[in-house]
Image (tube, grey):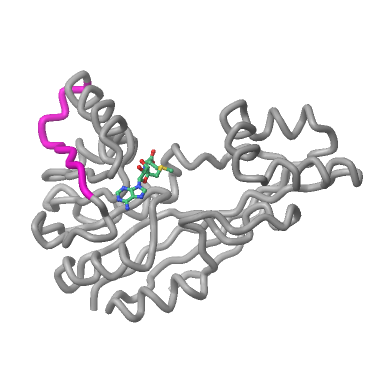
Amino acid sequence: MTSLHLHSRGRLAFSPHTVSPLLRGLILQEPTRKLAILDIGTGSGNLALSLAPHARRVVGIDADPRALALARARARKMRRANVRFVEADAETIAYTRWHPGMVVANFCMSRGIIQRAGRALPPGHTLVFACLHSDRYRELHVVPQRFSYHEDEIHRWLRQAGLRLEHLSVHRETHPLRTLAQARRFLGPHGVERWQKTGRWEKMERYIQRGGGPVTESWLVAKARKE
Ligand SMILES: C[S@@+](CC[C@H](N)C(=O)[O-])C[C@H]1O[C@@H](n2cnc3c(N)ncnc32)[C@H](O)[C@@H]1O
């Protein structure tokens, strides 16, 4: 098992909508051409579409019909005939109906998703995912976001689901934020709106008023194999 902590300063590698080379590499180490891959929380299909040329077939599931419409349009445009997008709640549906040979997820993760992957995967097959780490924005003392976890709980849930951990790395980026203009640029216009609605923007304002400092982005990448 690999367990790593990686830290970079001021470099903008993180986005919950891009597929990291590490995640892609961990997936493509497997014999994906022979596998049916199930992408959980596929959104507009970033991961599913990037894996399609390397897989037997890919099913992407998501609860958001608008994101799925975009994913289907992208699949048509890219002529990816082996990808299908299905509207489903990943925390209530059984994955066995898709007979997945691999389950993947890019920033959509929960204990229920891990349990379902554990039930659906045949022995020797893998779950590979990236998700937010509960350390994200720790300097601001905001409530950890939905789908953000500490590596210890991920480790425990994988074990309980009969999945043996092969890789777990925690990634951190620090962003120096000293002015509100920097904070706005960091979050983007939609981010600021979301933070205002959820009361988190006030915490950011207070942090900046006290002189600001580093703000940490934090996420983890994991791969586990069904026993
Ligand atoms: C941060 S986005 C990531 C999207 C995509 N994986 C990507 O890499 O661009 C999280 C996605 O998870 C989906 N999601 C959240 N909860 C879900 C659930 N219970 N069932 C299915 N999809 C869910 C959201 O609709 C959203 O599209």
Residue 119 x/y as whole percent? 19, 71
Q: Which quadrant of the structure image shows residue 103?
A: bottom left
Q: Quadrant location of the C terminus? A: bottom left
Relative to 106, is 12 on the left or the right?
Answer: right
Residue 167 lies, with reference to residue 221, above or below; the image says below
In depth, the one of 134 and 168 nearer the eye is: 134
Name the residue: 21% across, 48% down. 88
| Residue at the farthest top position | 77
Q: Locate residue 118: give its quadrant.
A: bottom left
The quarter of the image holding the N terminus is bottom left
Residue 53 at what x, y percent from top left? 20, 36
Give coordinates of residue 199: x percent, y percent.
66, 45
Q: Is residue 66 left or right of residue 123?
A: right
Does the magenta run of residues contain 179? no
Q: Position of residue 75 (x, y in %)?
A: 20, 27
88 to the left or right of 139: left
Is residue 123 placed above or below 57 in the rendered structure?
A: below
When the figure is inspected, residue 49 is found, relative to residue 147, above or below; the finding is above
Which is nearer the eye, 135 or 7?
135
| Residue drawn at 14 percent across, 53 percent down | 35
Q: Is residue 150 left or right of residue 162?
A: right
Identify which residue, 15 or 169, lies in the foreground.
15
Q: Which residue is located at x 14 percent, y 69 percent?
A: 122
| Boundaries of the magenta span | 78-88
- Tally of numbered tags: 0
The image quadrant where one finds ligand 1 is top left
